[in-house]
Image: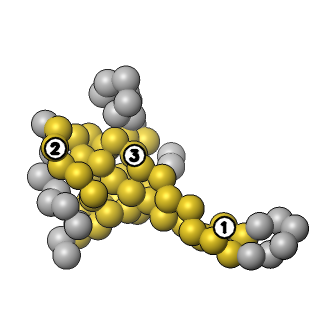
Amino acid sequence: MKIFTGIVTARKMDKTATVEVARIVVHPLYRKRFKVTRKYHVHDTTDAKVGDNVKFAASKPFSKMVKWQVVTKKTK
């Protein structure tokens, strides 16, 4: 099961939050490190606010774009 940690960036949908996950990637040839970010639509029943850190895991599809569910949240 995949579990990611990210920051809530938007809370405009009902029971759905947009979470941004950032990770550091090393270029295979030049060894330069750079940050890659990706946004996920996450099913959220914990009412996380914008700026909260959340852990979310893969789950059954709730809709076309929402295939993740919040496991825990940590307020800022």
Q: Position of residue 39 (x, y in %)?
A: 41, 49
**Residue type indicated by callout 1:** Val
| Between 38 and 16, the one nearer to me in the picture | 38
Q: Badge 2, how many Cα within 10 Å: few under 14, some, many 20+?
A: few
Which residue lies at the image location 30% right of the left edge and 48% below the top edge? 18
Which residue lies at the image location 17% right of the left edge and 38% below the top edge? 13
Q: Mark 2 and mark 3: span between their CA atoms?
A: 14 Å
Between disc 2 and disc 3, whose residue precedes?
2
Residue 68's place in the image compared with 20, above or below, is: above
Q: Which mark is residue 12?
A: 2
| Local secondary structure at mark 1 | strand
**Residue type indicated by callout 3:** Tyr
Q: Quadrant of the C terminus?
A: bottom left
Residue 21's place in the image compared with 33, above or below, is: above
Q: Which mark is residue 25?
A: 1
| Local secondary structure at mark 3 | strand
Whether residue 71 appears in this view of the structure is: no
Which residue lies at the image location 24% right of the left edge and 47% below the top edge? 17
Q: Which mark is residue 51?
A: none
**Residue type indicated by callout 2:** Lys
Q: Badge 3, how many Cα within 10 Å: few under 14, some, many 20+?
A: some
Report the residue marked by disc 3.
40
| Local secondary structure at mark 2 | strand
